[in-house]
Image (cartoon, grey):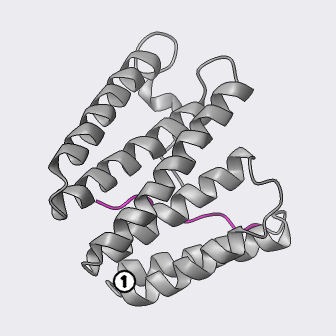
């Protein structure tokens, strides 16, 4: 399935101008995805991707999360159009950013947190989507490698977040 297709970004008035513009373009793309118009969704996701490049502080968690959401949904929209090569590229970019997002969160926060959970969950969704795309293009070994990485990440998440002090109910749904 898709990541974030029914989860909208907040475009509050307290967001900086370009970040609000990016969120609006992204949200419009989600409306088109919900109606199955993946071609128009792709157009708006590409506009959101370009708009995101103008957002300040490229290595900040919010910016990285935004880029993961855009690139993953772009990959999904392309996948739905059977543009598997382009979908793979989008998911590969998203995977790189998702890994960077998780590292930034881990560097900034020394204990398990909702931010780390969000970063790990984003990474897991990218791994799943990219492995499905690889399966569609006959890249079975690559798909298997990503599934295994996703399985290991899922086990880490279970061990870290769903036992001990933190409970599943402590984490809000993943929102983009």
Residue at 66 percent of width and 70 percent of height: 23
Q: Say which quadrant the C terminus sits in.
A: bottom right
Residue at 48 percent of width and 36 percent of height: 120
Which region of the structure is painted magenta? 1-12
Residue at 38 percent of width and 73 percent of height: 86
Q: Position of residue 119 (x, y in %)?
A: 54, 39
Q: Is residue 62 covered in magenta?
A: no
Q: Position of residue 56 (x, y in %)?
A: 83, 60
For residue 113, say whether it is visible.
yes
Work out whether 101 lies above or below 126. Answer: above
Q: Locate residue 136 relative to residue 98 in the image: left or right.
A: left
CA neighbours of label 1 inside 10 A, class few (<14), some (14 to 19), many (20+): many
Residue at 84 percent of width and 63 percent of height: 14
Q: Quadrant of residue 163?
A: top left
Pick the residue in front: 4 or 60.
60
Q: Position of residue 151 (x, y in %)?
A: 28, 31
Extreme residue in the top direction? 164
Q: Say which quadrant the N terminus sits in.
A: bottom left
Work out whether 157 lies above or below 98. Answer: above
For residue 5, say whether it is visible.
no
Q: Locate residue 7 relative to residue 144 in the image: left or right.
A: right
Q: Locate residue 19 relative to residue 150 in the image: left or right.
A: right
Q: Main structural element of the magenta stretch: helix, strand or loop?
A: loop
Pick the residue in front: 167 or 39.
39
How many marks the image carries: the answer is 1
Residue on which the image places disc 1: 38
Q: Secondary structure at mark 1?
A: helix
Q: Position of residue 96 (x, y in %)?
A: 52, 48
Work out whether 80 lies above or below 89. Answer: below
């Amino acid at each position: 399935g898709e990541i974030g297709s029914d989860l909208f970004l907040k475009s509050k008035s307290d967001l900086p101008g370009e970040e609000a513009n990016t969120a609006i373009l992204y949200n419009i793309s989600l409306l088109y995805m919900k109606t199955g118009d993946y071609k128009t969704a792709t157009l708006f996701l590409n506009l959101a991707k370009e708009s995101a490049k103008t957002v300040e502080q490229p290595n900040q968690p919010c910016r990285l999360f935004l880029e993961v959401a855009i690139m993953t949904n772009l990959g999904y929209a392309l996948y739905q159009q059977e543009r598997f090569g382009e979908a793979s590229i989008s998911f590969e970019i998203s995977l790189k950013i998702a890994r960077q997002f998780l590292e930034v969160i881990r560097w900034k926060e020394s204990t398990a947190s909702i931010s780390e959970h969000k970063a790990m969950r984003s990474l897991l969704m990218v791994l799943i989507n990219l492995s499905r795309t690889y399966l569609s293009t006959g890249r079975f070994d690559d798909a298997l490698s990503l599934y295994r990485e996703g399985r290991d990440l899922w086990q880490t998440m279970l061990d870290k977040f769903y036992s001990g002090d933190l409970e599943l109910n402590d984490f809000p749904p993943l929102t983009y």
